Image: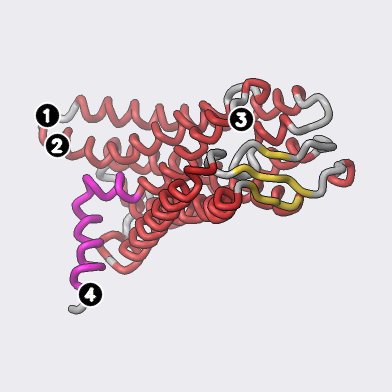
Amino acid sequence: MFNQTRVTQFILRGFSDIPEWRLVVVLFFSWVYAFALLGNISVIIAVVRDSRLHSPLYFFLKNLCFVDLSYTSVTIPKALETTLQGSGVISYFECVTQFYIFFTLGSTECFLLTAMAYDRCMAIYRPLLYGAIMSQRLCCALVVLAWVGGALYAAFLALNTFSLPFCGPNVVEHFFCDIPPLMRLSCADFHSSEEMVFAVGSCVIMSSFALKVLSYIHIISTLLRMPSVDGRWKALSTCSSHLTTVLLFYTNASFTYLKSASQYSPTQGRLASIFYSILTPSLNPVIYCLRNRDMKVALHRLYCQRKF
């Protein structure tokens, strides 16, 4: 399949095409990357070390942080190098690999967020049976399904995209190998492949989103029946972090992938990708820790009481 292409390498653009801004942009995203690494690794270590955080909620959060940690590492290091140099060469095989890993992680995050919505639904909708329903076996099964689903969906996207012939030019107007800019480089009609991505992507994204919506409908209906206002706010606070992450993820991902590649704008595409592939994974640890007392205590114990 892949031997049909004449292109053996691609040229990536960096975060910015303005030479005067390159150093500032590299310094900023280096700081963002360091912040993402520190935040996600800290949450993972805190959850592993603190026995009070050995619950389904934090089990999913730990896996989400691992995905976010990997998610940013797939694109940022290469993008920083590319931005500093003005452009960067990536081989065809490296492009396919980066593409596949990126979408495996992105799809896995989408499915993990669905599992987390189900977890919050069971915690509020069926509190007395929560421990029995969300067993360790079920939690592990949901995480495995998220990874398998992400890997299979990414394989479909990779086969659909790289089955197109690339004859040149080979300049990808993006800081990583992404679907819209790659399809625009094809020397054949890519509309049938684009329609296939849109159809399957819409089913995957919208079905996953629908499950989240159903979970939150159950959560809201349960909260409205609670006699205590304080109980409502306490229960709602456990879901607010997850809801914020879901909105950030879906808003930016939908803006990028649920529209035609022929309408792709390099500037808008890069901005949207920065939000959902870099800033959102970097902010997730902060979002989940701000209103979570147990998480804040665990992190404080990790960094401020290590001498004890």
Residue 65: give x, y in percent of width and height.
42, 53
Q: Decide whether residue 295 is among the magenta residues.
A: yes
Q: Is residue 201 left or right of residue 45?
A: right
Q: Which dot, 2 or 3, sits closer to the camera?
A: 3
Residue type, numbered disc 2: Gly
Q: Decide whether residue 282 is among the magenta residues.
A: no
At mark 1, the secondary structure is: loop
Span of residues in magenta: 285-305
At mark 3, the secondary structure is: helix
Q: Which dot, 3 or 1, sits closer to the camera?
A: 3
Vertical placement of 297 versus 265: above or below? below
Determine which residue is flagged by label 1.
Answer: 227
Tell which circle, 3 or 4, labels the residue nearer the N-terminal end. 3
Disc 3 to disc 4, how far (Cα)?
Answer: 46 Å
Determine which residue is flagged by label 2.
Answer: 231
Determine which residue is flagged by label 4.
Answer: 306
Q: Which dot, 2 or 4, sits closer to the camera?
A: 4
Tell which circle, 2 or 4, labels the residue nearer the N-terminal end. 2
For residue 175, what is the image quadrant? top right
